[in-house]
Image: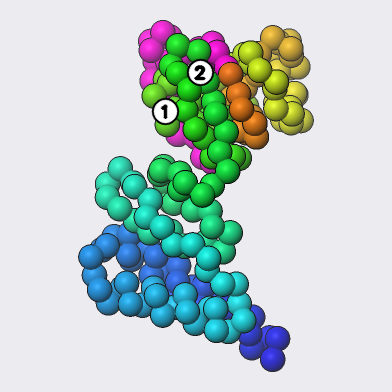
Amino acid sequence: PEKVRIAGQAIAFSVLGCAVVSLSTFPKNPILIFLLSTTGLAISCMGGIPLRRAYPINMKKGKSWAYSSSGRSSPATGRGTIPHHMPTHKVTAEGFGTFEVEEGTKLVLALERNGVDVSHRCGGNARCTTCRVTFQSEEPPMGETERQCLDEDGVLGEFRLSCQSRVDRDMHVTVLMRASEQGWDPGVEVED
């Protein structure tokens, strides 16, 4: 019975994934909406992971629906509005104001999504150090990748990399290398 349930879950999740992708492409198709609803119900009835939340995410090119067992969204582009039930923290960017950011978001993405033209030339891989920030508040923990990068460049302790910092508390930062001030585009898109 356990193998049957697991296999059933795998099939149901595959169908659900296809339906979500299709729904984001054709959001007004009632057949896909029905398929998505019945698939979610099938997963719950099989004793699988119940889908707790379904909410719209405002995307740049239209509206899409995200379903999740945790209540968190996973839009393909990573760009969307934070649902009100998610834990958030206040991030203040010197000269840009304060905004609410979902917990766990990379700081570089939080800044960029809220109008700060922070540089990230290497795409958030801790190679270029252009996403530099200083904290006027308590700093989040530093990971080994960030520590090695800053140590190799001889700048450990001078600034932090916003591509390696995740929002886990209220933060107050100053962006040290804005793309507009450097005369370049921000850089390769950063993945969350």
Given residues 137 and 153, the one toward you in this image is 137
- Quarter that holds the N terminus: bottom right
Determine contact: label 2, label 1, CB under 8 Å. Answer: yes
Marks 2 and 1, the one that precedes in the sequence: 2
| Residue occupied by mark 2 | 93
Residue 151: name its quadrant. top right
Q: Is residue 49 left or right of residue 12?
A: right
Residue hosting label 1: 114
Residue 36, image quadrant: bottom left
Q: Position of residue 14 (x, y in %)?
A: 49, 73
Residue 26 visible in the current orientation:
yes
156 sits to left or right of 125: right
**Residue 182 among magenta residues:** yes
Q: Position of residue 50 (x, y in %)?
A: 56, 72
Report whether 44 appears left or right of 180. Answer: right
What is the span of residues highlighted in magenta in the rendered image? 173-192
